Every structure is written in structure tokens, then in C-alpha cells.
Amino acid sequence: MDQRRQIECLMRNIWLVLAVLGVAIPFSHFAPFLMEQGLNLPLFWDLLFANRVSSFFATDLIISSIAFLLWSYFDSKKNKVTHWWLILAANLLLGLSLALPLYFFRRHSALK
């Protein structure tokens, strides 16, 4: 296997590992809330913006997610990355920590 192919294979594996970690690690923090409170969205929203630090991270993540979704949508058209709706669903249901590496994994496959 030539060096370029090895790097491509390594990058695909890295994106996949980051996608798995992007689900597992954030969910390990969210699962206790779900077990204690259920899907209490008003409480979740209140806690998300409970102080200036958490508000900073929440707004940063919201703006980053919107920017990523816009960029990835148009990039998927340009580079023929199929099933972009999976990226949208991943971002809205699980978060940017899954959607971003998942998109890079799919994009890397499409550009081969």
C-alpha cells in the first residue's frame, strides 16, 4: 500500500473514531440528566443558560452548528457527498461532536 493510501485509510479511521467519541463522551454527561429528569426540555434549556460560562458555550456551539450545516450542505453538493440529511439529523439529534467528524468521514470517502 502506498503512503497516500495509508494516510487516507488512517484519516478515515480517525474521523470514525472521533464520530464515536462524539456520541459517547457528550452522552455520558447527558444520560444522568435524562435518567433523573426525563426529557424535561424547559429544565434542560434553563440549565443550558444557567450562567455566563454555560451560555458562552451554548451560543458558541449553536452558531458553530449553523455555520457547519450551511458549509457542509453546499460542500456536499459541490463534492457529491451523498445523504447530507444524515449530517443534519446527527447535528440536531446528537450534536456537532458527531456531525462534524461524520461529515468529514463521508466527504473523505466521496473525494477518493
Image (cartoon, grey):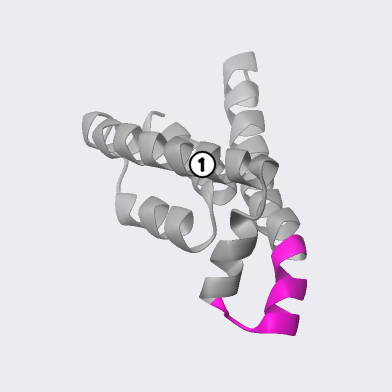
Residue 45 belongs to the span the image colors magenta:
no
Q: How crowded is mark 1: few (under 14 residues within 10 Å), some or many (20 or more)?
A: few
**Residue 39 is drawn in which quadrant?**
bottom right
Asked whether residue 34 is drawn in magenta, I would say yes
Picture coordinates of residue 55 (x, y %)?
A: 59, 45
Instruction: Look at 67% across and 48% down and name the residue there.
Output: 51
Q: Which of 13 and 62 is in front in this view?
A: 62
Classify the position of the N terminus by image quarter. top right
Q: Is residue 59 depicted above or below 92 in this figure?
A: above
Q: Give the range drawn in magenta.
A: 29-40
Answer with left or right where residue 70 lies relative to residue 42. left
The image shows residue 19, relative to residue 63, as above or below, that is: below
Residue found at x 46% / y 53%: 91
Q: Residue 93: image x %, image y %?
A: 48, 63
Local secondary structure at mark 1: helix
Name the residue: 58% across, 64% down. Answer: 46
Nearest the viewer among 31 and 36 is 36
Quadrant of residue 28 within the rendered picture: bottom right
Mark 1 lies on residue: 59
Q: Which amino acid does label 1 sit on?
A: Thr
Q: Main secondary structure of the magenta part?
A: helix
